[in-house]
Amino acid sequence: MNDLANGLLWYLAFIFSVVVHEASHAFTAMKLGDRTAYDGGQVTLDPLPHIKREPIGTIAVPIFSFLVGGWMIGWASAPYDRNWARAYPDRSAMMALAGPLSNLMLVLISGLLIRLGMAFDWFYAPERANFTHVTAAYQDGAPYALSVLLSIMFSLNIILFVFNLIPLPPLDGSAIIPLFISNDKAVRYLDFIHNTPMLFMGLFVAWEIFDHISSPMHTMFLNLLYPGAGYH
């Protein structure tokens, strides 16, 4: 597969995954009383409103990271009312949790499609699996492209799920904490994590943590996908 085709598959997986993540935040907030993201057009799987809101994170950075490293990173965002979050910290925590859970759902769907492909003899478990080679195709052309797309979807959403659950700001994991503490403490906690210097520090530390856990987590999911395969 040439670089352009590979890049297109990467971008399809990336933009769909981050749009589902942010739309899940927006939809959950709307259902729980905050219509900020809904009014901003983020309760949708149409990528355009999300791209317009964060063009650098959804276009420039993913393309640059692919050209430099061969894989895509980036971001999108959904707006919310901080006064609503302070008034209902448990609801804001559920909104935060919705994003990572949507990525876990995409991991499961990708895995089910891979297993379905195996049942129809389109795919098989590779002897050595990696980020873009979670499954392998018996034929070239469309089956091979689909195997790469599903592999990227599977792996990328593991990353989005695990990374976003690290309990450090500005990641979703930090905003889930109010589910486990009293409302008074939750309000003070939310005020604390919205401190701008804390946001940059948290992101830096989270990347350091993730560097140590990403490979073991990917291997764990691979062995769940292929019981008895013994990937390590």
Image (cartoon, grey):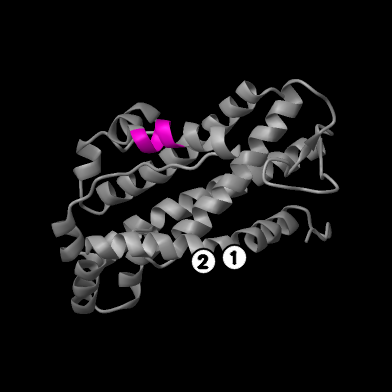
When asked about the image quadrant of residue 68, the answer is top right
Q: Main secondary structure of the magenta part?
A: helix
Image quarter hosting the N terminus? top right
Please state if 198 lies on the left or on the right of 144 as rendered: left
Q: Quadrant of residue 188?
A: bottom left
Give the residue drawn at x 62%, y 40%.
Answer: 152
Task: Give the amino acid type for the residue marked by disc 1 in the picture.
Answer: His
Residue under the point 26% across and 63% down: 197
Q: Is residue 131 visible?
A: yes
Give the labeled residue for mark 2. 209
Is 53 or 125 nearer to us in this picture? Answer: 53
- Determine whether 226 is above or below 26 in the image: below
Which residue is the extreme one toward the front?
68
| Residue drawn where x is 64% and y is 33% of the image | 149
Q: Which residues are magenta?
A: 56-61
Identity, as a three-letter code, of the amino acid under mark 2:
Ile
* For residue 17, side relative to residue 47 (left or right): right
Helix, strand or loop status at disc 2: helix
| Residue 78 screen position, x and y as percent | 29, 44
Question: Where does residue 122 sit, x and y in percent of width and height?
Answer: 81, 32
Q: To which residue does mark 1 refer?
A: 212
- Residue 203 lies, with reference to residue 151, above or below; the image says below
Number of residues whose C-alpha sits closer than 10 Å to that of mark 1, classed few (under 14), some (14–19) or many (20 or more): few
Q: Is residue 39 above or below residue 161?
A: above
- Expressed as whole percent of the image width and height from the top left, the position of residue 219 reads 70, 58
Find residue 201 and report its horizontal and vertical position in percent. 35, 64
Contact check, label 1 and label 2, Cβ < 8 Å: yes
